[in-house]
Structures are given as C-alpha cells and as structure tokens.
Image (spheres, rainbow, N blue to C red):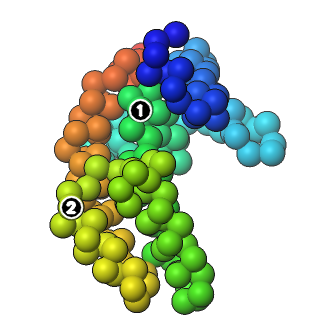
Amino acid sequence: MCRELESLPITCLERAKELKALFRSFLQKPDLSIISHSHKTDKIRLNMDEPLKWRQSFENLLSNQHGLCLFRAFLVSEFSEENIAFYLACEDYRITKTSSKLSVKAKKIYEEFVCSDAPREVNLEHETKAITKKNLERPSQSCFSLAQEKIYTLMEKDCYPRFLKSITYLEISRQVKAG
C-alpha cells in the first residue's frame, strides 16, 4: 500500500473500497443493475438511456441517482470526494427552513469544508472563503451560494470530463450500446 493511503483515516479507506466494489458490481452485471445501499437489498435497474443522458450535461449526471453515485465513487477514486460532499451539503442546507437549524448547519459545513485546515477542505480561493465566512454572521439559505458555485464549476470543468473518459463510464456506455 502506498504511503498516501496509509495516512488516510480508516473510514475513508473503507468507503473507497465500498465504492470500488460498487463500481465493479456495476460493470459485472450484464443488465446494468446495482444493489441499493438502503436497508433493503432490492435491485435497482439502470435505464439504458441514463448513461447517455449523463454525457449530455453535468446537471443530468448530478440529478440522476445512479449517475451521482458513480460520479461520487469516481471522485473517491481520485481523492476528491470532498467536492461533491460539499456541493450536496450546500444543497441540503439551502432547503433548511428554520433559522436555528441554518445556523447549526452553516457552522458545521464551514468547519468541515471551508475553513483553513478543515478535515475535508475544498479548493476555494481566499476571497471566496472570506465572503463565505462573512455570510455566516447572518446565516441565510444563500450564504454558501458563491462557494458552492465555485465548486460546481470546478467539478463541471475538471472532474466531469475526466469521469466521462473513465474506464467505468466508458464500460457502462459500451454495455448500453451493446445491449
């Protein structure tokens, strides 16, 4: 095992192994079915046109349960899962209704993803971090909007094109064309 992996927390390594296994099971199923990670063990069928829609736009990928799951697993394999985790935390934050919950969630998101030396720090320039920190003085549903937009753009311009060239996506696309 390489030294970089040894320094990761065990939970991170375990999650990466789970997602790698999910990738593998996705590719081994000729009918492109996957196992749900809910309490049930029902099979969820991947519609044959889903992978083609993912190529059409990044938004299509993120709005699809299976596409999001595969993209997240891809980001784990590239050690950049914090980007999608931050994006999804912001999405959850935006739909929070009560101001007391907004304040608690805002602090948690900031400390986990935005502040310097955060455990899952996302790549934001100093100015965006400063604006986000100032927004936390009066938490609102939009206080992470700028930072979320920056991370969305980063994923769309950098990670998404690499995902579309990944072995996993190409294999799923090949199976769709063959099937």
> Which type of secondary structure does the marked residue at label 2 adopt?
helix
Q: Position of residue 2 (x, y in %)?
A: 46, 12
Mark 2 neighbour density, 10 Å: few (under 14) some (14–19) many (20 or more):
few
On the question of residue 32 being in view, the answer is no
Q: Residue furthest right?
A: 40
Mark 1 neighbour density, 10 Å: few (under 14) some (14–19) many (20 or more):
few
Q: Amino acid at mark 1?
A: Phe
The residue singled out by tag 1 in the image is 79
Q: Residue furthest top?
A: 1
Query: CA separation, marks 2 and 1?
Result: 22 Å
* In the depicted structure, whether residue 128 falls above or below residue 139: above
* In the depicted structure, whether residue 89 falls above or below residue 46: below
Which of the 4 quarters of the picture holds residue 144?
bottom left
Q: Amino acid at mark 2?
A: His
Q: Which residue is rendered at x = 51% and y = 26% of the image?
A: 7
**What label does residue 163 carry, if any?**
none
- Label located before the other in sequence (2 or 1): 1
> Which type of secondary structure does the marked residue at label 1 adopt?
loop
On the question of residue 83 being in view, the answer is yes
Q: Is residue 33 left or right of residue 93?
A: right
Q: Position of residue 37 (x, y in %)?
A: 70, 40
Question: Decide: marks 2, 1 in contact (CB < 8 A)?
Answer: no
Q: Is residue 160 left or right of residue 27?
A: left
Q: Position of residue 143 (x, y in %)?
A: 36, 78
Q: Which residue is rendered at x = 80% and y = 45% of the image?
A: 39
The residue singled out by tag 2 in the image is 126
Q: Which residue is rendered at x = 29% and y = 38% of the image?
A: 159
Q: Which residue is rendered at x = 28% and y = 24% of the image?
A: 165
Which of 69 and 144 lies nearest the eye of the viewer? 144
Which of 77 and 35 lies nearest the eye of the viewer? 77
